[in-house]
Amino acid sequence: MDVNGKGAKPIYINGNASSSSNYNLPAGSYLGFYDGTNWQFRTDGIIPGKIEKLGTARAIDGVKFDGSANISHYGVCSTAAATAAKEVSCTSFDLVTGARIIVTFSNTNSAANPTLNVNGTGAKAIQYRGAAITAGQLAANRTYEFVYDGTAWQAVGDFDTNTNTQYSAGTGLSLSGTTFNHSNSITSGTVAGNSGTLSFGGTITIPKITYDAQGHITATTTTSLTLPANPNTHHQAYLRAGGSTGTGNAATTTGNTHLILTENDTRRSAVKLAPGSNMAITSDSGGTVTFTATDTKYSAGSGITLTGTTFSLTNNSVGVAGNTIALGGSVDAATLRESLGLSSAMRFRGVLGSGTTLSDGSTTNPVMIGTTSVTAADGDVVIDTSSDAEYVWANGAWERLGPDGSYKVLQSDVASPATNSNTKVIEFIDTITQN
């Protein structure tokens, strides 16, 4: 029979080759199947097409099936706990995407990043929620299901992390059901001492307990403590001023040169008092010690002020009274001439300023007196400190006063004299003599 031009194949009826001589197939509908060589038809009640085995095995969740035997997706892994490369056997297993394997592990995994190799198909990472399995997650005697996603074995479901660790009561503890209790060898109660106010010689009752190394109270009792008797005396200590000898209160009347420590009128120790420089120590019979400074004290007199430890002049001017030159006050030109015996035609104008110099016959006029420009008139006298000489203005020129019988004013420090023609203030003059 040729179906769809696939080629003519022999027809077998009830397992025998058909021919016009041995069998004619009655008219009707028949179910036939091609066994790879012949077309098989049945007329004896046997269902045609029943097969005992697939011609080509197919993988079901990774396990090949051809109909000849049962299949299983289960295996036991006995790989050592510390070995990361886990291995398991499963008959007819084929590693394809979507393949499943159910594994019971004999040992709890203790290795990091474990892999699984099923039937030698290759070691693939074991993951839980997309991350590598950690040590301890695959527990001994537990069964897990994995699905291969084309790259790694993914754990199905959630891991039960309960290790069911069992605990027992150690020393000093008791366990009732799931509750641990601290055990004692005595019953509950109170250990009390005495209360109230105690007097001298009284007894205090103190609670006493005994405990073991675990802190358990093993026994209770009391102990007692007796207070000392009343001493019936008063102890008093004093610090007094006194002499180097004596006891009790008498120590205060023998010259107060020491500080005395006494207890109940008994001398215990003494510290000598010694005055320092410019200091005196005095005492009285009552035990009072007085320290007095012996430094000489100075005060400011007339024309002088005292600020702290500094004395100062009241002012720096010079005055003339008769033939006396005194600190403080001022003097006019006429009085100065009269006091010094100068000619009435002369008038002292002051000291030339810095940078101004004169010589005999100089015609410089005006001149600087201190910091002020002054125009000299006949009879005006000035001092040139650069040459330690005095000059008088006469007839349009300066004439030096010298050993010609004229008067000479000797001065060592005249600072910034005034320019008033009628009054001259000299701040300080050491010596004025007649030449």
Image (tube, grey):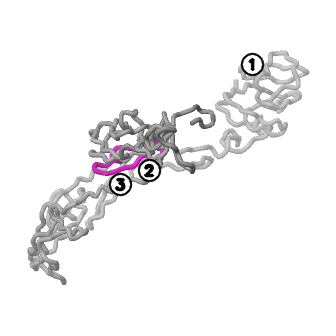
Mark 2 element type = loop
Name the N-terminal-most of marks 1 and 2.
2
Q: Quadrant of the C terminus?
A: top right
Q: Which mark, residue 180?
A: none
- Report the residue that reaches farthest toward the right: 396
- In the image, what residue occupies the spot 67% across and 33% down? 429
Verify CB contact (< 8 Å) between mark 1 and mark 2: no
- In the image, what residue occupies the spot 60% across and 47% down? 304
User: Where does the image place residue 341, in percent across and percent down from the top left?
Assistant: 75, 32
Q: Which of pointers 3 and 1 indicates the residue nearer the eye?
A: 3
Residue tagged 2 = 44
Residue tagged 1 = 402
Q: Residues within 10 Å of mark 1 (few under 14, many from 20)?
A: few
The Cα–Cα distance between marks 1 and 2, rounded to whole angstroms, is 184 Å
Residue tagged 3 = 161
Task: Tell me the kind of residue under disc 3.
Answer: Thr
Verify CB contact (< 8 Å) between mark 3 and mark 2: no
Magenta stretch: give its range. 130-148
- Report the residue that reaches farthest toward the front: 21
In the rendered view, tell whether residue 190 sits above or below residue 17. Answer: below
Mark 1 element type = loop
- In the image, what residue occupies the spot 83% across and 39% down? 422
Task: Tell me the kind of residue under disc 2.
Answer: Asp
Mark 3 element type = loop
User: Where does the image place residue 395, in percent across and percent down from the top left?
Assistant: 90, 21
